[in-house]
Image: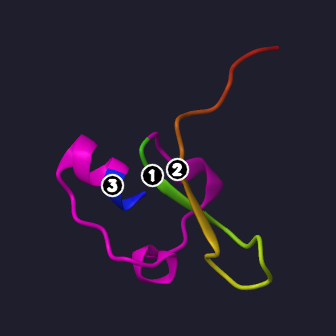
Amino acid sequence: MRYVVDRAASVQLPRTTAEMSGRAIEPDEIAPGDLIFFNTTGRPHSHVGIYVGASCDS
């Protein structure tokens, strides 16, 4: 994540997902490019992804 964000936006992120995380937002506030955090190992912020937008397929 650090490499991608640095290359795409010249933004230096912290090293760990816990350090990257900020305030929680409501689902309707999320926007493309936001970092989203997951609990995949039983601890908060164990994985991070980039929100690219919702699918409108029906």
User: In terms of secondary structure, where does tag 1 sit?
Assistant: loop
What's the amino acid at mark 1?
Asp
The CA span between labels 1 and 3 is 15 Å
Rendering coords of residue 3 (x, y %): 33, 54
The N terminus lies in quadrant: bottom left
Rendering coords of residue 50 (x, y %): 51, 48
Q: Is residue 31 left or right of residue 54?
A: left
Q: Are marks 1 and 2 in contact (CB under 8 Å)?
A: yes
Which residue lies at the image location 54% right of the left edge and 65% below the top edge? 25
**24 magenta-colored:** yes
- Identify the residue position indicated by label 1 in the image: 34
> Mark on residue 3?
3
What's the amino acid at mark 3?
Tyr
Q: Nearer the viewer, residue 14 or 27?
A: 14
Q: Nearer the viewer, mark 1 or mark 3?
A: 3
Q: Residues within 10 Å of mark 3 (few under 14, many from 20)?
A: few
Of labels 2 and 3, earlier in sequence is 3
Q: Nearer the viewer, residue 52 or 46?
A: 46
Rendering coords of residue 15 (x, y %): 37, 77
User: In terms of secondary structure, where does tag 3 sit?
Assistant: helix
> Mark on residue 30?
2
Which residue lies at the image location 35% right of the left edge and 61% below the top edge? 2
